[in-house]
């Protein structure tokens, strides 16, 4: 027996049996409208921060794509791009684990890994052509940093379950730490806290020449930091570390954004 999808007056009827005057025509022609209305008010629809937070994060990958097509490689901040590759890799996992699961966030960070990887490739090519004597040492130094970060992440994954079990068996505050849903044994802790590396990069670059600052990238990081301050309170579990790291990110990125705007437009 046909079941109603959109109310008691609408049944599932084969399309070749629906005539212009059929009582089911209205239901057949407009199902997408009902689906769109349902999406607008859904848990991850555009009426929620679950939508706008991840959408703002698309600015990271789109800014890298924009810079790759319109700007020279001299504005590339290789340390920031390398950091974003690892950061977005962690957030791919975070987006899959957080509730409600966020496919927009998953997609934008997957794209950012590729976009920032391309920026690193452009930076390396530029250095090898313009600074052939020092470029190999610079590339080696960057690869050591990336390798060290990868080694720490791998060691953390290997040690996670034994350490978590040991903490649980100790009881008291150690067991409480092991049971925390946003504690140090879960991606809900590591992805947000790795975001501190973005802010640290901003602080290290406090005096970076404004001609080497990307307006699109600093705008994207300021925006995503601001919106994610709100998002940290509406996800499950509530993530206070995510709030504070985005507070610092939006402030430090906003500092560079203000410097860039002042230098270029005032």
Image: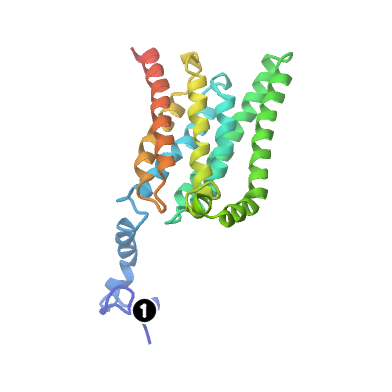
Q: Is residue 178 left or right of residue 144?
A: left
Q: Nearer the viewer, residue 226 or 61?
A: 226
**Residue in view at x 43 percent, y 24 percent:** 215
Q: Could you say whether the residue bearing mark 1 is in a helix, strand or loop?
A: loop
Q: Is residue 171 left or right of residue 242?
A: right
Q: Quadrant of the C terminus?
A: top left
Q: Nearer the viewer, residue 95 or 169?
A: 169
Q: Which residue is labeled 1 in the image?
A: 12
Please say if 219 is above or below 103: above
Q: Is residue 147 left or right of residue 208?
A: right
Please say if 81 is above or below 17: above
* Residue 236, quarter of the rendered image: bottom left
Please say if 223 is above or below 264: below
Q: Nearer the viewer, residue 170 or 20?
A: 170
**Residue in view at x 59 percent, y 57 percent:** 169
Q: Residues within 10 Å of mark 1 (few under 14, many from 20)?
A: some
Residue 8: image location, x then y, percent = 26, 79
Residue 210: image location, x then y, percent = 46, 15
Residue 138: image location, x then y, percent = 68, 20
Q: How is the image coloured?
A: rainbow
Q: How many marks?
A: 1
Residue 203: image location, x then y, percent = 48, 22
* Residue 249, quarter of the rendered image: top left
Q: Quadrant of the N terminus?
A: bottom left
* Residue 17, quarter of the rendered image: bottom left
């Amino acid at each position: 027996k046909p079941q109603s999808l959109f109310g008691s007056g609408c049944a599932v009827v084969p399309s070749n049996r629906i005539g212009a005057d059929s009582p089911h025509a209205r239901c057949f022609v407009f199902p997408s409208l009902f689906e769109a209305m349902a999406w607008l008010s859904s848990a991850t629809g555009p009426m929620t921060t679950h939508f706008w937070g991840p959408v703002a994060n698309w600015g990271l990958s789109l800014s890298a794509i924009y810079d790759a097509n319109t700007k020279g490689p001299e504005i590339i901040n290789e340390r920031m791009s390398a950091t974003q590759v690892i950061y977005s890799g962690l957030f791919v996992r975070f987006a899959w684990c957080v509730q409600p699961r966020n496919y927009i966030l998953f997609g934008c960070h997957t794209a950012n890994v590729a976009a920032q990887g391309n920026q690193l490739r452009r930076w390396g090519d530029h250095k090898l052509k313009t600074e052939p004597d020092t470029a190999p040492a610079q590339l080696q130094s960057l690869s050591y940093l990336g390798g060290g970060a990868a080694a720490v992440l791998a060691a953390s994954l290997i040690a996670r379950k034994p350490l978590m079990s040991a903490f649980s068996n100790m009881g008291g505050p150690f067991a409480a730490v092991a049971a925390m849903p946003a504690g140090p044994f879960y991606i809900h802790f590591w992805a947000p806290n790795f975001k501190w590396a973005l802010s640290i990069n901003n602080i290290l670059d406090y005096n970076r020449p404004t001609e080497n600052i990307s307006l699109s990238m600093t705008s994207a990081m300021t925006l995503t930091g601001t919106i994610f301050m709100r998002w940290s309170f509406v996800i499950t579990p509530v993530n206070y570390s995510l709030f504070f790291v985005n507070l610092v990110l939006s402030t430090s990125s906003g500092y560079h954004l203000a410097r860039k705007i002042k230098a270029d437009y005032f």
